[in-house]
Amino acid sequence: MTDSELDTPIWGAKPIGREAGLLKSDGKVDLRKTFYALEAGYLDADKIGRHWVTTPRRIRRQFAGNAAA
């Protein structure tokens, strides 16, 4: 993934959950886990109104530390 792709905004819980790998056994995004992780601050994202936004770089940094930076 290029630097520009790592900094492309991801809008909404479903694509954020997909990027973070929060999936059910059937491969669909687990929205309950995703919203919990977002609301609890476990995923690095901002809430703008009722919408969540982040970037792949911010999500990957949560799991890989500075290696994803």
Image (spheres, rainbow, N blue to C red):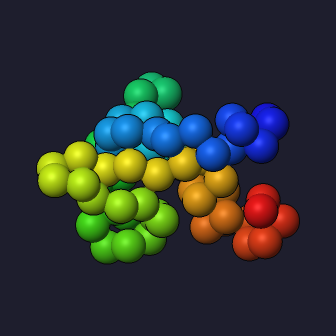
Report x, y in % for residue 29: 40, 35
Report x, y in % for residue 5: 69, 35
Q: Nearer the viewer, residue 59 or 55?
A: 55
Q: How many discs mark residues in the rendered view?
A: 0
Report x, y in % for residue 22: 47, 46
Name which quarter of the figure residue 19 lies in. Answer: top right
Q: Residue at x 27, y 58 (%)?
A: 47
Q: Residue at x 49, y 27 (%)?
A: 27
Farthest-out residue, front? 4
Quarter of the picture holding the N terminus: top right
Name which quarter of the figure residue 36 lies in. Answer: bottom left
Report x, y in % for residue 48: 24, 54
Farthest-out residue, left? 50
Name which quarter of the figure residue 6 lies in. Answer: top right
Q: Nearer the viewer, residue 44 or 27?
A: 44
Q: Is residue 39 left or right of residue 15?
A: left
Q: Is residue 67 visible?
A: yes
Image position of 46 with respect to 15: above or below: below
Q: Is residue 3 left or right of residue 11?
A: right
Image position of 38 with respect to 57: above or below: below
Q: Residue at x 78, y 71 (%)?
A: 66
Q: Residue at x 61, y 67 (%)?
A: 62
